[in-house]
Amino acid sequence: EDLGIPEEDFPELAKVAMTVTRPLENNPRKVTIEDAIEIYGEAY
């Protein structure tokens, strides 16, 4: 919120984040786009 990113941008941010594959491949849990959107929401 402090960065001025509106919540409606979370799906697009999550979509872009899913293209950074190395951290996702090394994560012990499979991360879905829905997970990424939820993570952004919790950090907001």
Image: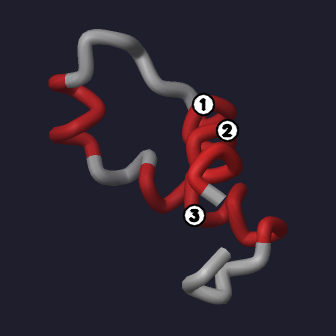
Pick the front one: 31 or 42: 42
Residue 26 found in image quarter? top left
Q: Residue at x 56, y 85 (%)?
A: 3
The image shows residue 5 at horizontal and vertical percentages of 66, 80
Q: Which residue is mark 3?
A: 13
Nearer the observer, 12 or 39 = 39
Looking at the rendered structure, which numbered label has been put on residue 15? none
Q: Nearer the viewer, mark 3 or mark 2?
A: 2
What amino acid does circle 2 point to? Glu
* Residue, disc 1: 35
- Specify few, some or many for label 3: CA neighbours under 10 Å numbering under 14, 14-19, or 20 or more: some
- In screen coordinates, is 37 left or right of 3? right
Query: Is the C-beta separation of discs 1 and 2 under 8 Å?
Result: yes
Gap in angstroms between the C-alphas marked 3 and 2: 11 Å
CB atoms of marks 3 and 2 within 8 Å: no
Of the 4 image quadrants, the one containing the N terminus is bottom right
Residue that carries the numbered disc 2 in the rendered image: 38
38 shown above or below 44? above
Q: Amino acid at mark 1?
A: Asp
How far from the left and from the top, in percent, is residue 18? 44, 46
CA gap between label 1 and label 2 equals 5 Å
